[in-house]
Image (tube, rainbow, N blue to C red):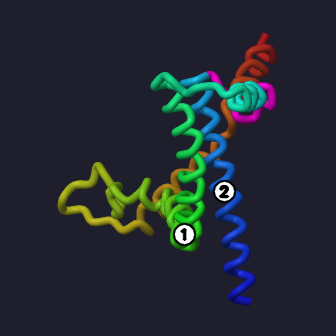
Amino acid sequence: MKKIKKGLKFIFSGAAATALCLYLARRLLVYVWTFDIFSAKQWEVISNYWNGYGVISSGTDYLFFATLFLVILFWVWLWRYLYNLNLSNAFGAIYRFFADRDVRKFEDEDSHVVIKNLSSHEKKTIEDVIQERIAAEDKNKDKEPLAQRIRQQIAQKFNKK
């Protein structure tokens, strides 16, 4: 089981390193030298230049070929780095960041409830406040709706005439 786990880690880290390295190399080479590493025509131009005994003479040519060589070294280094990286800690850090996001959002707020507009000598509990609000709502329920009262008043005025 341990060998399978290491093999999967090796394959996964190699795929991730390859994808990242090819993406970065393509962006760099297209930006600096307008050379697309995925274009067969551009590789054919380099092959014809090399087979035609072309001479590397300028500094930009040296930098170009050095970059192509360093891309390979960077790929090997990145693969090794990703293989040695403890993935459980990396994914765990991402999970903890998103899991604790709601907790961090409310950390700075006060944790106690403040009931305002009470005099200093009057002490009420939450239950007392709840009972008062329930009683106030019950009083409002006993009253007729406003629209009903208006209809009754209009009906009374028409009946008087």
Q: Residue at left 58%, top 26%?
A: 55
Q: Residue at left 52%, top 39%?
A: 66
Q: Nearer the viewer, mark 2 or mark 1?
A: 2
Q: CA distance from mark 2 to mark 1?
A: 18 Å
Please state if 34 lies on the left or on the right of 3 as rendered: left
Q: Amino acid at mark 1?
A: Gly
Q: Residue at left 71%, top 58%?
A: 15
* Quadrant the C terminus occupies: top right
User: In the rendered image, which residue does mark 2 sit on?
Assistant: 16
Please state if 97 lies on the left or on the right of 114 as rendered: right
Please state if 108 lies on the left or on the right of 10 as rendered: left
Residue 143 position within the rendered picture, expressed as x and y whole percent measured from the top left = 63, 42
- Of all residues shown, which one is farthest toward the left? 120
Q: Is residue 146 within the magenta segment?
A: no
Please state if 48 lies on the left or on the right of 82 as rendered: right
Disc marking residue 92: 1
79 or 130: nearer the viewer? 79
* Quadrant the N terminus occupies: bottom right
Q: Residue at left 68%, top 49%?
A: 19
Look at the picture and state if 80 lies above or below 58: below
Asked if residue 139 can be seen in this view, the reply is: yes
Residue 83 position within the rendered picture, expressed as x and y whole percent measured from the top left = 58, 69
Residue 49 position within the rendered picture, expressed as x and y whole percent measured from the top left = 70, 26
* Secondary element type, mark 2: helix
Label whose residue precedes the other's in the sequence (2 or 1): 2
Q: Is residue 38 within the magenta segment?
A: yes
Asked if residue 42 can be seen in this view, the reply is: no
Q: Which residues are magenta?
A: 34-41
- Of all residues shown, which one is farthest toward the bottom? 1
Label 1 neighbour load within 10 Å: few <14, some 14-19, many 20+: few
